[in-house]
Amino acid sequence: MITIPGVDPKMIANNLEPAFPTHPGEVLKDEIEYRGISQRKLAEQIGMGYSVLNEILNARRPVTEKTAMLFEAALGVSAETLMRLQTKYNMRVARKDKTFMQRLDEIRKLAAIF
């Protein structure tokens, strides 16, 4: 997080978070559309079922380490970058889960007692 004396850190552009997390599938979908590659052809090329690929590209299935490496081999998109996006996406989704966040607050309160 970037800090500037006298400036609220939430008001610094580099510290802002988008309203919606970016699933790595969205990035991959843009990439294959830009290249003019069909989803069916890519799925066949990397040995993945079309429906699995489509679910990843439409943010209904996560990118795993192995699928990230498959995309890296086929498209040259860094597997590490895809995994960082997936982790950030997962964390943002978890933070929006109010029930889970309440549970964390309760655990923090209990931990403060010890």
Image (tube, rainbow, N blue to C red):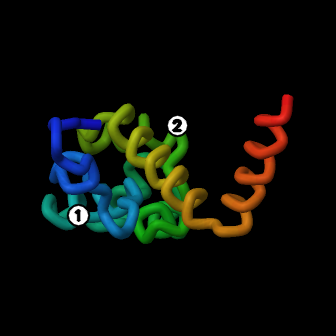
- Whether residue 86 is visible to the viewer of this picture, yes or no, is yes
Q: Is residue 77 left or right of residue 103?
A: left
Q: Residue at x 85, y 28 (%)?
A: 114
Residue 112 in picture, x, y percent from top left: 77, 35
Q: Can the viewer see residue 70?
A: no
Identify the element where label 2 is drawn.
helix
In the image as oriented, which residue stretches furthest toward the front?
A: 6
Q: Which residue is mark 2?
A: 66
Specify few, some or many for label 2: CA neighbours under 10 Å numbering under 14, 14-19, or 20 or more. few
The residue furthest top is: 114
Look at the picture and state if 9 lies above or below 25: above
Q: Residue 93 sits in which quadrant? A: bottom right
Residue at the image position 33 percent from the left and 63 percent from the top: 26
Q: Which residue is mark 1?
A: 30
Name the kind of residue labelled 2 in the image. Lys
The amino acid type found where label 1 is placed reads Asp
Which residue is painted at 24% across and 50% down in the image? 8
Sequence-first tag of 1 and 2: 1
Q: How many numbered tags mark residues here?
A: 2
Q: Does 66 appear above or below 102?
A: above
Residue 52: image x %, image y %? 54, 63
Residue lying at 16% horizontally and 53% vertically, measured from the top left? 13
> Which residue is nearer to you in this view: 2 or 73?
2
User: Do callouts 1 and 2 mark residues in contact (Cβ within 8 Å)?
Assistant: no
Percent of width and height locating residue 76: 24, 37
Would residue 3 be found to the left or right of residue 22 on screen?
left
